[in-house]
Image: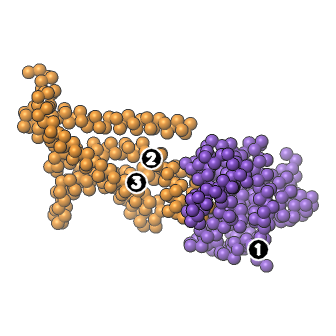
Chain colours: A orange, B purple
Amino acid sequence: MDLFETFFNLEVLARSFPMLLKGLWLTLELGAASILAGLVLGLGLCMMRLYSVRPVQILTRIYIDVFRSIPLLVLLIIVYYALPFVGVRLSPFASAMTALTMVSGAYTAEIFRSGIEAIPKGQFEAAAALGLGHRQTMVDVILPQSIRMVIPPLTNNSINVVKDTALASVVAMPDLLKQATQAQALAANPSPLIGAAAIYLAFLLPLVLLVSRLERRLNRGKA
Amino acid sequence: MPGYISIRNLQKYYGHYHALRGIDLEIARGEVVCVVGPSGSGKSTLIRCINRLEDFSTESAIHVDGVPVLPGANLAKVRAEVGMVFQSFNLFPHLTVRQNIMLAPRRVRGTTKAAAAAQADQLLARVGLASQAEKYPSGLSGGQQQRVAIARALAMEPQVLLFDEPTSALDPEMVGEVLDVMRDLAQTGVTMVVVTHEMGFARQVADRVIFMDGGEVIESAPPDAFFSAPRETRTRNFLHAVLDH
Ligand SMILES: Nc1ncnc2c1ncn2[C@@H]1O[C@H](COP(=O)(O)OP(=O)(O)OP(=O)(O)O)[C@@H](O)[C@H]1O
Ligand SMILES: [Mg+2]
């Protein structure tokens, strides 16, 4: 049989399409939930890292460095297979979301920090001199300026989170990749895998291109 | 009698560097004080201590209208009464000119949006920028930006205005428009402390000129006496150098 029949078997693809769609939905749910939770966690970590008392700053820093270093797959397996030994039993979705959020939060915290530290000192001073409190300074003056700068790296991080959702298939979560491998087994044909790859690309490639465009625009603004 | 701004034994260290060496200064309500001196003499540090943008030693004390300038709840209160204008303007680039002016009244004083907007437009008219309210700071010249910064400080209706070399970052042709606004302000009875290299402005507008060198106040005198009959050799040398050039 020829290559096309093996990898791009339209009949197999059509049959597995509903399964892939179901997986895609779960992948997107997991990705979106983890990205949002990671943003909240990251902003909180960033504020603690920059503006809390010294011991908390140090702990936050340790958290951030540890969770940027640990391989996500290792963390996921710990959450899913090791935590039950201490009585914490999470569903595959919850395990995956926990692991993704903890890591995404660490990266997001660093992204926010770079965005805040890129704001000139004079902006903080002007806000302070006007009598704005710390919170008001952050909300009205600093963060709106930081957000513009951090959108490209945050989008990059989001792309990574969505890609990493594929790891959830190892804890038996029926995400896009898992559905594809199952469909492949059923049909004894790898076309569903190619289909899944195409779907990942269809979602993520435009985002990658968007980041490049945003970065170019931001750099132009600087010049 | 303690002044409206009262500075007692102000000591400031940057690490081991002794930037302010025991400054005592009383400034009366409504007084306009110009601070001059060579680069690195501590002029910026001095006025940045008044609203505590710089921390200072516990042995030092600054009071504004009787309120000690200490970290904590009182500090925001002091800062709301003390406006500051920076050399580099420090306008908020993501806000329009009007929004720049409205922000502090709305957030700190709880002024309504309509009242804050009306006040902003009034202030913009006062600094000669009535038609620029909708623009962003990046669309303005340096002189215009600095006038917006002055309007932004005025929006809090401060009792004290601090200026740190407000014209030093400007192209020469824009210095005049900013000094004109400051000259008008000096007539309004607001207390002003102005760090400046503009000797003409100091001579005309100041009630008192202070000369700093090496983190100390070397001389303090009314402008006539200061410029025509300085007592200290260091003041004379400084004036000689700046007025000759
Ligand atoms: N953040 C800082 N860290 C360390 N040293 C500082 C800092 N800020 C100022 N200094 C030092 O303190 C001294 C006084 O500085 P200051 O900025 O008050 O001088 P100035 O009189 O305003 O000078 P200029 O006319 O150049 O603005 C200088 O020697 C300066 O190098
Ligand atoms: Mg200075």
Quarter placement of the C terminus of chain A: top right
Question: Which residue: 85% across, 45% down?
Answer: B245
Indicate whether A185 appears above or below A26. Answer: above
Hey, which quadrant is residue B201 in on the image? bottom right
- Tell me the chain of label 3: A
Tell me if A128 is positioned left or right of B217 in this view. Answer: left
Amino acid under label 2?
Val
Question: Which residue: 11% across, 34% down?
Answer: A15
Q: Earlier in the sequence, mark 2 or mark 3?
A: 3
Which one is nearer the viewer's eye here, B88 or B112? B112
Q: Is residue B193 visible?
A: yes
Mark 3: which secondary structure? helix
Residue pointed to by mark 1: B3
Where residue A147 appears, as percent x and y from the top left, is: 46, 49
Tell me if B185 is positioned left or right of B204 in this view. Answer: left
Query: Nearer the viewer's eye, disc 2 or disc 3?
Result: 2
Quarter placement of the N terminus of chain A: top left
Q: Are marks 1 and 2 in contact (CB under 8 Å)?
A: no
Q: Crowding near pointer 2: few (<14 within 10 Å), some, many (20+)?
A: many
Q: Is residue A181 visible?
A: no
Amino acid under label 1?
Gly
Where residue A125 appears, as percent x and y from the top left, is: 60, 58
Residue pointed to by mark 2: A150
Residue pointed to by mark 3: A109
Indicate whether A1 appears above or below B9. Answer: above
